Image: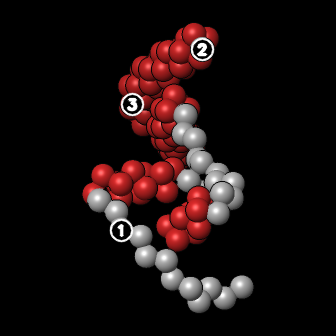
Amino acid sequence: MIRKKWLTVRLNEVEEKKLLDYFQKSSSPALSEYARDVLLKNPVTIVYRNASADLWLEEMILLKKELNAIGNNFNQAVHKLHTLRDIQEVKIWAIQNEISKKEFFGTMHEIQSVMNKIYEQWLLK
């Protein structure tokens, strides 16, 4: 349907801010569509953001990146092991791998701590 009619509404700054806040919380793609829905008393879908879920998601994304990095490091270490030719090279690799192993277990401990905190927060709800 083509809309040919205009409606001009004057707002003060407080009213405009309130209107824009409501609009931003809605799922409407345009302010004009949101305003039409409100004026005509059509249903308006409000997007609800769960802050604790957002925090959880951010933590999970960081953990995923960390686990990917650990996996890449492990693959590189195994590849290096397969290319070694003598005992001295194997000894050097073993020392470097021990350092990586300590970093790995430290990171896994951090991941467990974060997971425990998230679990405890969700239990309280």
According to the image, label 1 marks what residue?
10
According to the image, label 3 marks what residue?
96
The location of residue 63, given as percent across then percent down, is 50, 33
In this view, the residue in front, 32 or 58, is: 32
Seen in the picture, residue 22 relative to 34 is either above or below; the reply is above
Q: Nearer the viewer, mark 2 or mark 1?
A: 1
Mark carried by residue 56: none
Name the amino acid, label 1: Arg
Name the amino acid, label 2: Lys
Q: Can residue 112 be seen from the camera position used here?
A: no
Quadrant of the drawing holding the C terminus: top right
- Residues at badges 2 and 3 in contact (C-beta under 8 Å)? no
Mark carried by residue 125: 2
Secondary element under disc 2, as helix, strand or loop, is loop
**Which of the colour schemes (rainbow, by chain, secondary structure, one colour) is used?**
secondary structure
The location of residue 19, given as percent across then percent down, is 43, 55
Secondary element under disc 3, as helix, strand or loop, is helix
- Measuring 69% from the left and 54% from the top, which residue is drawn there? 43
Quadrant of the drawing holding the N terminus: bottom right
- Measuring 57% from the left and 10% from the top, which residue is drawn there? 124
